[in-house]
Image (spheres, rainbow, N blue to C red):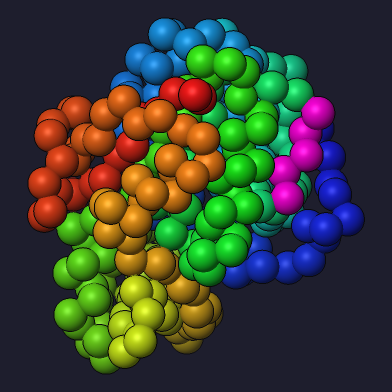
Amino acid sequence: MVFTRDNASFMNDYDLIAPFYDAEHGHFDEDLNLYSNFAELCGSPLLELACGSGRLLVPLAREGYELTGVDTSASMLKLAQEALEQAGVASQCKLVQEDMSSLNLGQKFRLAFIALGSFGHVYTRQEQRKTLAAIRKHLTPGGRFILDISNADVRYMEHLSGQMLHQGTWRRDDDTLLSHFVSPASSPSRHLLELMHFYEEHRQGDAVHRTVITTYLYLFERNEVELLLEEAGFGITDVYGDYELGAYEHDSPRMIFVMEVR
């Protein structure tokens, strides 16, 4: 069941991206072992922020965990609900349409996580602080928080302003081809990327249908994330550079923080 909150009842960028999201990301599971292992360590209940279409909710629910998934996009949550029902695990997961920065679930969790760089879409310092403080309030004493931030790929795009990058092409079940292109533009005054997304749908013999969407992604440095987390009351236990828990370096693919509530 999706519980809609008044402060989240608006269309956002991911309502527009939702029809294309699973073709590109639905089968990505390189990070699943990371969350599964920490879920085994912490136990239920689990909280995923920016849960999207349920890519991680479904396999974790299949493992027997009780979860709450939060997202601002009603369209993404609808996809998540459908995926949970199809997998037969909908009873183990509550979905909530709410902004991370104003989180008010009336429940505490043993493990919370933001996967696949989604925290980068929180791009003002005020909202970043509010988001981390809200997550902190929803964790039990000794509870853990995992924050996965994109690193090497966004730094690569930072130097390609004005160019067009092909993210991939996928064939859907109805034989439609879906292609995703991104044109990045970096801000001269802020650590911020403007990403213009072009989704092109094409079936042989038909015209190409293009959808254009603009999103923004904050470019984090390790020291500023550490300061934000410490201000919010988190004790950082590890910082990893990939999903195999390799040590973080400046050019690592990911910047993954594992924390405990102090």
Residue 37 against residue 115 in the figure, above or below: above
**Residue in the picture at 34% in, 74% down:** 191
Q: Is residue 108 left or right of residue 1?
A: left
Q: Is residue 259 left or right of residue 210?
A: left
Q: Position of residue 163 (x, y in %)?
A: 23, 87
Instruction: Name the residue at the right extreme.
Output: 6
Instruction: Examine the image and state in which quarter residue 54 appears.
Output: top right
Quadrant the N terminus occupies: top right
Instruction: Examine the image and state in which quarter residue 85 appears.
Output: top right
Res 214 visible: yes
Residue 111 against residue 207 in the figure, above or below: above
The residue segment tinted magenta is: 102-106
**Residue in the picture at 68% in, 17% down:** 92
Res 243 visible: no
The answer to which of 137 and 47 lies nearer the viewer is: 137
Count of numbered badges drawn on the protein? 0
**Residue in the picture at 65% in, 63% down:** 15
Q: Position of residue 35 (x, y in %)?
A: 40, 24
**Residue in the picture at 66% in, 29% down:** 138
